Amino acid sequence: MSHHDDVIVLERVVVRYRQRLVLNHLDLRVPRGAFFAFLGDNGAGKTTTMKLLTGLLPPDAGQARILGLDCWARATQLRHLVGYMPERPRFYEWMTVEEIGWFTAAFHRPGFLARYREWTGRLGLDPAMPLKNLSKGGYARVGLALALAPDPPILLLDEPTSGLDLLTRREFLAHLRHLASEGRTIFISSHSIAELENVCTHVGLLRDGQMLLTATLEELRQKVRRLSLRFAETAPDPTGLGTILLRNGTGRFWQVIVHEPNPRAVAALQAQPGITDFEDTPVSLEEVYALFMSRSRNGVPEDSAEIPWVQRCDGTLPRRREAIP
Ligand SMILES: Nc1ncnc2c1ncn2[C@@H]1O[C@H](COP(=O)(O)OP(=O)(O)OP(=O)(O)O)[C@@H](O)[C@H]1O
């Protein structure tokens, strides 16, 4: 289903490197104003997707559009609308912080340099510092200032926090959250899943060049729950609770992680005689990531009811695939 307010749209996108299928009919939609965490294991195709969106790579098939413009055919126009921070920014090392801004401004509209200076000031960069003398964090800030200087409504950030220390990462993400609060759409790939959970609104899990799931963070919190309890004599039977993603326990402690729990079955479980310390809590994004990724890696068929997510993030709830009777 299409939605007019999706600013990033990928439809059946295929990218091959030689014979290798890297993006496999990838479908993805990112609504306006989303802070979208684009997650996936090494080699899943995140950087390839970023390159496609920034017009550095044409798709072999399918379409990639930002704000309705084809990412490859309209790349020049999109340069003014999309800020991009590559995974490994490579600048002219002999330039200073000021000079790289001045140099890059030549490719952009008026106002770029003034905004670049404003951002480098806000990010605490010394304009006279040669780039080769910057720490990784300093380098990342220059990359962010360059990405922000066109004042773009959309920001694409490819692992911007990798290699940064904890406080720098947090500070960086706080800047991004502020930018998102101003109405920008942020599409970020990262392996810092727990940190992103604090700032993002949407999550997409990429696996082997396809989206395994996309959802809002709120949907995930509601739909994937941990039920834990202590029982007196016999362990409860989880049948009917929903799709059990994980089940374990020790002694008289019992817990399951369940997708789309059935509220009546959960209430009935809680009311069973001998059940104490009952808790029904959301599951961390890291745990959701590990559960879904490892299940698919272990060969659960993709069309199985066990990965019951509809690949959408337009605000409607993902619907569970109907179980075959
Ligand atoms: N230019 C290229 N030629 C051939 N293969 C490539 C090329 N670029 C990427 N690949 C391969 O395509 C696959 C996807 O790579 P990509 O960089 O998109 O993954 P990623 O999700 O960004 O991974 P990571 O998290 O490790 O950065 C990998 O197996 C990679 O080796």
Image (cartoon, rainbow, N blue to C red):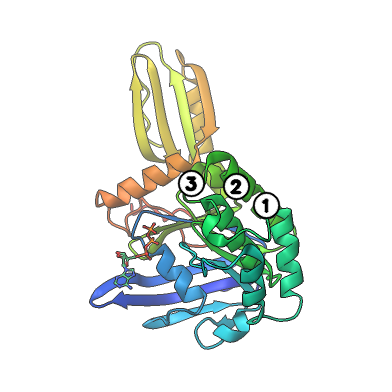
Quadrant of residue 34 within the rendered picture: bottom right
Q: Is residue 134 above or below residue 50?
A: above
Q: Nearer the viewer, mark 3 or mark 2?
A: 3
Q: Earlier in the sequence, mark 3 or mark 2?
A: 3
Label 1 close to label 3 by CB (< 8 Å): no
Q: Is there any visible trace of residue 241 in the rendered image?
A: no
Locate residue 303 relative to residue 37 in the image: left or right.
left
Locate the N terminus and report the quarter of the image it occupies: bottom right
- The amino acid type of the residue labelled 3 equals Ser
Question: Dot 3: few (<14), some (14–19), or many (≥20) neighbours within 10 Å?
Answer: some
Q: Earlier in the sequence, mark 2 or mark 1?
A: 1
Spatial CA distance of label 3 from label 2 is 19 Å
Label 3 close to label 2 by CB (< 8 Å): no
Q: Nearer the viewer, residue 198 or 305?
A: 198
Q: Is residue 307 above or below residue 151?
A: above
Q: Nearer the viewer, residue 23 or 288?
A: 23
Identify the disc placed on residue 158. none
Helix, strand or loop under label 1: helix
Kindly identify which residue carries mark 3: 192
Spatial CA distance of label 2 from label 1 is 22 Å
- The amino acid type of the residue labelled 1 equals His
Q: Residue at x 47, y 81 (%)?
A: 63
Kindly identify which residue carries mark 2: 218
Helix, strand or loop under label 3: loop
Q: Residue at x 42, y 82 (%)?
A: 58
Residue 152, position as x, y percentages in the image: 68, 71
